[in-house]
Image: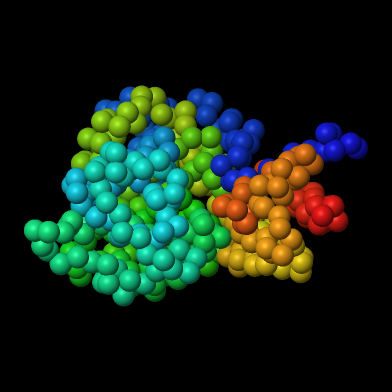
Amino acid sequence: MSVSQTPVADFYSDTQTLPTNDMLKSVIGVKTGDERHGACPTTNALCERVADLFGMESAMFLPSGSMCNQIAIAVHTQPGDEIICSRESHIVFAEAGGLAKLSGAMVSVIDCERGLFVGADVSQLYRRPSSFAPRTRLVVTEQTSNLGGGAVWPAEQLEDVAKTAQDLGLSVHMDGARALNASVATGIDLATYANYHDSAWLAFTKGLGCPVGAVLAGSREFIQHAWHFKRMFGGAMRQTGVLTAMCLYALDHHVDRLAEDHARAKRIEAVLRGCELFYQVYPADTNIVLAEINPQFGITASELKAFLAVRNVHVMAVGIQKIRMITHLDVGDLEVESLLAGIDAFLESI
């Protein structure tokens, strides 16, 4: 088989997953209605289920996780307020400055290992009330930490951060894009991870394999306020049951199998640790493998990415020296072998 005929092995992101045939079939005959008026029974069922998973009172369906983050920020802050988060947070590097444009918020970042900070970091950055300073108002956590290589926050550490913030009078929001990956990896439920958080959300377009959607959860008052921004930001929809039926299917059929993704990521990590091309390989706690190219080779991540792409293997370049590979529903053992063979071929070519 020629390189051009090699099946695609897409490790760029778990957002590349396609709905399975059975997931698509789950939409047939689904009951739907106007979601903006609470008249979609399928969407209501999904929101109730996710709220229960997080141990929260209420929830709302949204097109994307980024919109979940931006709406939560808008609810929790006023223009000029300050947010505390890690420098690697998704709201900092991947949401187009939305927190500044949509909410007029500032951000104070924590430099920490793998994006996981502690309560003392929050205390250090908290600003005492002053007419000269912005008001510290919100702390954002991210479970798992994307640019931390899918690092899982220990439950005690998350609780320490959230409880510290609460004691300081701050709100706490969890970017839970891959929170179920953390739960499957550790056996700890989402409600435990979300303890002392005021809001949290779960993505369905990553490891769960859905084409659209995320669910934001919080108190009834929080969700009522969030609806205002949902409409303002253009995220209110109509017959969403055709989307949320697939999300319900994913909760029933695609959660336990996340362990398969984790095992494949662990295999990639183990092989790359023995490869001289890489200076550092982050622990693969879940489904993300992050590896830093050894500078002695004078090779950039973009060059490695381009070489692999010719072989129909796709990865993400993170900065100049790091590559990110994510395992998911649509990559199996054969795709893993293609990735590893491509890296070997690249090493031989330089």
Quadrant of the rendering where the C terminus is positioned: bottom right
Which residue is located at x 25 percent, y 42 percent?
A: 103
Percent x, y of residue 128:
15, 67
Left or right of 186 on screen, residue 44: left
Query: Can you say whether 9 is above or below 141 in the image?
Result: above
Residue at the farthest right position: 1
Q: How many marks?
A: 0
Query: Can you say whether 95 is above or below 34 in the image?
Result: below
Quadrant of the rendering where the N terminus is positioned: top right
Left or right of 212 on screen, residue 195: left
Q: Which colour style is shown?
A: rainbow
Location of residue 276 (image quadrant): bottom right
Query: Can you say whether 78 is above or below 119 in the image?
Result: above
Which residue is located at x 85 percent, y 38 percent?
A: 3
Asked if residue 207 shows in the view, the reply is: yes
Camera-side residue of 43 and 337: 337
Camera-side residue of 43 and 156: 156
Which residue is located at x 56 percent, y 52 percent?
A: 319
Asked if residue 263 shows in the view, the reply is: no
Residue at the farthest left position: 131
Camera-side residue of 171 and 182: 171
Percent x, y of residue 73:
28, 47
Percent x, y of residue 176:
42, 53
Which residue is located at x 72 percent, y 65 percent?
A: 296
Location of residue 282 (image quadrant): bottom right
Percent x, y of residue 110:
37, 64
Camera-side residue of 267 and 345: 345
Left or right of 244 on screen, residue 139: left
